[in-house]
Every structure is written in C-alpha cells, then in structure tokens.
Image: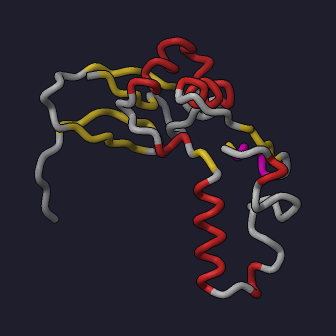
Amino acid sequence: MKIVINADHGGFGLSDEAVIRYNELLGRKVWCIKHEIFNYTTYSLVPPEQRIDKGNEPHGAPRTWHEMTKDEKDAYNKAYRNTTFYDRDIARNDPLLIQVVEEMGEKANDRYSDLHIVEIPDDVEWQIEEYDGNEWIAEKHRTWS
C-alpha cells in the first residue's frame, strides 16, 4: 500500500497546482482564491461570485457574524464547508493523491511540505505519526496513559 507523508517540518499540504490536478482527476473544477494579507489560499468548489463569503472579511465570516443566532452561524459554517475544498481532508492512501504526487514530484509540495510516498504491506493497520509536521507511518497498537 502506498501512503503520502510529509518528510520535513512544516506539515502536509499540496501546491495550488496539485489541488487543481487532484480535483481534475475527480472530474470537478476548483478555484484558488488568494488571500494576500494573510498569505493563504482558499480552494472553492464554486466560482468566487457564488461563494457565501464574497465581499466579506478575509477569513470568510460575514460582517454581521456577531448578530447571527447559533443556528444561523451553524448554517453558514455548513454552507461554507460544503463549497470549500481542504487538501488535509484527503485520505493519505487515496489513489488519486498518490497519482498526483507521483506525476508532479516536488511540484506537488506547498511551501511548507516535502511530500514522499511510503510503501507498506497491505495487511498493516497503520496511522500517521508526526512531530512538528514531520511525519512517518507507524503500525497501530494499543497504548494507555
């Protein structure tokens, strides 16, 4: 089994090009929305003009957030989540993720990542362990504290 890990401090992340390619393989379009002030990108599954956070604050919360009820905030958060793609939600053994990393090599990395593919036996129950974003594959076992 192949699994993608980040082999350097900083954490897992895909480049914009890798996010676009991954979504292409899924048969859908994704829009990269750059937030220059905070230097991050939001990946939208709908065109920017259809987003619920258009024209609002950089983090997407409407200016009237403090006036919304809990139910309204929950509905807003759900709608935002359903129209936003998060690369960290991808299963690390996803065949399409493996394909993207194999195809793109270093171009699949975001500015903090150094993605590698680790191959382990298919019958191993595994989990990703990490320290400061530097990851490795560990066989699952029981622990107590």
Percent position (x, y) of residue 145?
16, 65
Tell whether 106 sits left or right of 6. Answer: right
The quarter of the picture where residue 109 lies is: top right
Residue 137 is left or right of residue 131, and the answer is left
Q: Count the marks.
A: 0
Residue 37 percent coordinates (x, y): 84, 51
x 80%, y 47%: residue = 48
Vertical side of 14 occupied by 69: above or below: below
Please state which of residues 13 and 87 is positioned toward the viewer in this rendering.
87
Res 110 quadrant in image: top right
Query: Camera-side residue: 68 or 7?
Result: 68
Membership of 40 in magenta stretch: yes
Furthest-right residue in view?
55
Drawn side of residue 40 relative to residue 102, left or right: right
Percent across and percent down for residue 83 are 64, 52
User: Is residue 51 toward the left or the right of residue 144 in the image?
Assistant: right
Residue 66 % position (x, y): 75, 84
Q: Is residue 22 shown above or below 145?
A: above
Display colour scheme? secondary structure
Magenta stretch holds residue 14: no
Q: Look at 65% across and 60% down and name the residue there.
A: 80
Please identify the quadrant where the N terminus is shown.
top left
Task: Label the magenta part by its dominant secondary structure.
Answer: strand
134, above or below 4, in the image: below
| Residue 72: quarter of image | bottom right
Q: Which residues are magenta?
A: 38-42
Give the residue at x 67% y 25%.
Answer: 17
